[in-house]
Amino acid sequence: MSAPERIPPRSVTTAELLAEGELTVRGRIRDASNAALYCTVRYDGREAACIYKPIAGERPLWDFPDGTLAQREVAAYEVSEATGWGLVPPTVLRDGPYGQGMCQLWIQEQPDGELLALVDGEEPEDGWKAIGFADIGGGRTALLVHADDERLRRMAVLDAVINNADRKGGHLLPTDEGRLYGIDHGVTFNTENKLRTLLWGWAGEPLTGEAVEVLKGLREALRKGGALAERLAGLLTPVEVDATRKRIGALLESGRHPEPSGEWPAIPWPPV
C-alpha cells in the first residue's frame, strides 16, 4: 500500500497576513500628524512589520468631510494595484487593538536612494527635473530638483489619478531591490483639484505610451460594474469615484502630465 501523498503547506499571502494576522503594537510613529502605530502582524507561522492607523486616531479635516483617511489609503492601494505598477505597499482595512483602521506592510527604505536634491544654478543637470526654487536661508535660494526616474514618473501619474494633496519627499521610499513605494495617501480622491506634489518635473509633457495604456485599463476597470469600481465602492463616495473617472478621462484627452492649477500652492508644506 503506497504512502499518502504529502500536501505542502499553503503559503500565507501578504494580504491574508495583514487582514487576518494578530496585531501587536510595538511603538508609535511620533512625527505623524495622526495616530500611526508600528506593529508586528503574525498569521499561520508568518510574521511581518506593519503600520496600523486606527480611524479613532484621525483628526477631522474640513476639506475632506467624507469617509476616513484609512479608507482613502486603502483606495489608493487598490488603484495602484490596478495600474500593475505596485507603487503602494499592500494595504488593508481591518479591526485592530484600537478599532478599525488601515494596516500597511512596513517598507524598509534604502537610506542612500537619492531622489531629491537642492542645487545651484538656474537649470537642472542631466538626469534631473526642476521643481522650483526654495529659500535656504540668508536671503539665498537653491533649485529644488527630483530625479528623472521612470519610477517617479509613474508615481506622478498615480498621484494625478488619485488627486494626491500631499506628495512629500518623505512619502517616497526606495528599496534595496530597486522598487519605489509611496505612502501616506490619506488626503486623496477629493472631488476638487487638490494635487500638491514635488513631482512637477514632467508638468505639461506628453504622457509615456505605457502610462496611456495603463490609464485606458483604469478607465475600463472603473466603468460601472468594473472590478476596480466594485472595490472602491466600499471605500469612497459615488461622487469621489465619478471624479476619479473624470480625472482619468481628462488625462487621456490631454495626453499630458497635469500642470499646477494656480488655485493654491502646488507644493506641499513642508516639502520633505
Image: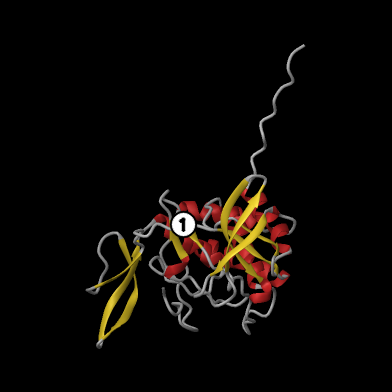
Residue at x-position 68% and y-position 75%: 56
Q: Is residue 7 above or below residue 20?
A: above
What quarter of the picture does the C terminus occupy? Answer: bottom left
Image check: 138 left or right of 145? left
Q: Most extreme residue toward the right, as rendered?
A: 1
What residue lies at 60% left-to-right and 74% top-to-bottom?
A: 35
Is residue 90 shown left or right of residue 7? left
Query: Is 157 in front, or is 57?
Result: 57
Q: Residue at x 45, y 60 (%)?
A: 173
Q: Which residue, given by chain and number where applicable, does mark 1 sit on?
A: 108
Q: Residue furthest bottom?
A: 139
Tell whether 52 sits left or right of 99: left
From the viewer's perspective, tell me whether residue 266 is left or right of residue 94. Answer: left
x and y percent of residue 72 in the render?
63, 68
- Looking at the rendered structure, the number of numbered marks drawn on it comes to 1
Which residue type carries mark 1? Gln
Dot 1 crowding, Cα within 10 Å, few <14, some 14–19, many 20+: few
157 is higher (above) or lower (below) than 266:
above
Tell me, yes or no, if residue 256 can be seen here: no
Q: Is residue 143 visible?
A: yes
| Image position of 200 with respect to 41: above or below | below
Judging from the image, what secondary structure is the residue with disc 1 in? Answer: loop
